[in-house]
Amino acid sequence: MTFRVAAAWPPVLAAILLIPFVAWPQQPETLTIYTDHPRLFLRPNRLRLLKRERERKSLRWDQFDLLMAGKAPMPEQGFASALYYRVTESPDAAKRAMAFALGPSTDLHQLALIYDWCQDVLSESDNRTLAAKLERQMAALRNDHSIPAERSRLLAAIALAGHLPAVSSSVITAFMEDIWPRQMVPVMRQGHPISRDDTFALLEIFHAVRDNLNVDLRESYPAYFKSLPIYHLLSHYPPPWPAAENQYRIPAVKDMKEPDLTRAALSRAAELAMVAYDANAPESQVLQGWLMNDQFLLRGTFGITYELLWANPYQPGLSYYHVPLVFHDDIFGRLFVRSSWEDNAEWLGFFDGQLQHFSEGKISVLNPSLTREPLDLDEALVFFGREVHKFKIPNRVSEHPTDKEPLRSSTPAVEGFDVFIVGLDPRRLYHVEIDDEEMTEVRADPGGILYFRNVPGPVGVRLAPSPREALQQGNPGLNKPGPL
C-alpha cells in the first residue's frame, strides 16, 4: 500500500503509522453469548455517550429529537424508534418500535435491533412472537450470501442468544467457522475488495462480533483493513454536494450518473463506525478530523439515526490535510490522486476496472489502455497506454520551501515525481530501464499499475513486457520498485 509516509506525514504521525498492527485473539474461547441486552452496538460506553448527547442538547441529538418528537416519517421507523427509546426510555417510543416489529415488516436488520434494544419492555408473549418472526426471516435469508444478509442474520442470532439457543448457536458457529474464514476472506484475498456499498454492513459485523465474542475480525486481513479509512478519504469526488438537509461527500462509483444520497449517507455511516471501532489508530484519527465538520452532519430522516448512533464528537481528530494526496492500493490494483484537499481540486481514480478523471466539476471516463498525454496532478504524474514503450519524465522545480528543503534556502529545489503507469497487463512482469540506470524487473499490480517513487527529471523511461514470463497470476507484493 503506497502512502509515502516518511515524506508527507508529520514525523510523529509517520512514526506511529509504522507501529505493527495489533490484532485481537484469532479464535474465541467459546461461541456462546453471555453479554446482557442490549448486545448490539449499544454497549454501556456507547449508551452513556448517547445519554450525554441528550443532556447536553447536542446538535445531533436536537435534530433527532425534533424529528422523533414531531413524528416525522422515518425511512427506518423501527430502528429510529428503538434507538429513541434506549436513550429516553420513552414508553411511547417503545410502543412504536414494538408496533413496527410485530407488524408486517420483514426487515431483519431492524427487527434484530428492536428485539435486542427493547427486551426490557417485551411481554413474554410478544417476546415469543418476535423471536419466532426473527427465526423465520433468518431462514428466508438462508440462501442470500450477500454481506448485508449475512450481517442481518448474525445480528439476529446474537440477539436471540439465550432465547432460541439452538438457532442462535447454529448461525453464529456457521459464520465464525465457515462463512467468514472460508468464504468472505478468501474472496478478498483473491483480489476482490468489499464493495463500498457493503462496508457499513461489514463494520456492523465487526462491532457485533467484538462486543460479544471478543474477536477482531480485521486480523484475517490486517493490511487491507488498516488502509480502509485512508481509502475512504481519497475515494470521494472533491466538491461536496449541496442537499436541502446538509452537504454530502459523494463517494466515487463506477459509471457515476447522478449522486446517490442514500449511498453517500451509508458511506459516512461506515466511516463513523470505523472510528468508533478503533478510535486510537492514526488512520481513524485523521478520518475523525474529516468527519467532524458540521456541514456534513446527516440531518435528514434517513441519515440522522446513523449519525447519532455512531458519531463521537468528543473524540479528538487530526487534520486530514496531513494525509498524502496519493493512495495506491497494490493489493487490489486501485489508485486515487488529488491535486489538493480543496473543493476545487483535480482528482483521478482507477477502481473497479474504470479510470475516472474529475476536473472543473465534470467526471470523465478514460480508457487507461489508450495512449494520451500524461496527467500531472501535482502530487503524481500518471501515464497511460498499454502499447507505449517510452516515457519522458519532465523536470520539476519547487519555487516554495517544503519540509525537504531548509527555509533559509531561496534557491529553487529539484523534486522528483511519484510516477504511475496505468493500463498495463495485470500482474505481469515488466522490464524497466531508466536513463543511466541498470534495467530492473517489476510486476504490475492486480489493476495493471506500475508505481515508481520520487523519480527525478528530466529522464527517459523505457518499458517492455518481460520475455521470460507469460501472463500469469503474480504476487502484488512484488510491485515494490522503490526509488529509481
Image: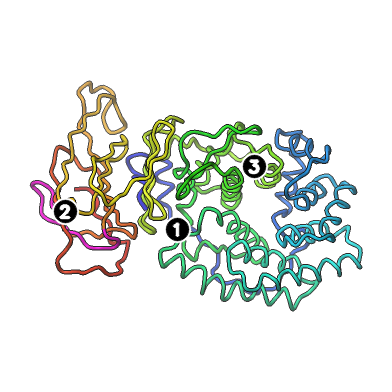
Question: How many numbered dots are placed on residues in this image?
Answer: 3
- Contact between labelled residues 1 and 3, with CB atoms less than 8 Å apart: no
Q: Can you say whether 259 is above or below 430 in the image?
A: above
- x 56%, y 47%: residue: 267
Q: Can you say whether 77 is above or below 339 in the image?
A: below
Task: Check disc 3 and give the amino acid type.
Answer: Asn
Task: Give neighbour class at mark 2: few <14, some 14-19, many 20+ (Cα, 10 Å).
Answer: some
Q: CA distance from mark 2 to mark 3?
A: 49 Å
- x 58%, y 50%: residue: 270
Place of residue 216 in the rendered image (x, y in percent of width and height, measured from the top left): 56, 62
Foreground tag (1 vs 2): 2
Quarter residue 475 falls in = bottom left
Q: Can you say whether 257 is above or below 183 in the image?
A: above
In the rendered view, does 85 fall on the left or right side of 390? right
Foreground tag (3 vs 1): 1
Label 1 SS: helix
Quarter residue 418 falls in = top left
Nearer to me, 339 or 289 = 339
- The residue at which mark 3 appears reads as 312
Task: State which tag comes first along the sequence, 3 or 1.
Answer: 1
- The residue at which mark 2 appears reads as 463
Task: Check disc 2 and give the amino acid type.
Answer: Leu
The colour scheme is: rainbow
Label 3 SS: loop
- The residue at which mark 1 appears reads as 224
- Magenta segment: 425-440
- x 31%, y 49%: residue: 367
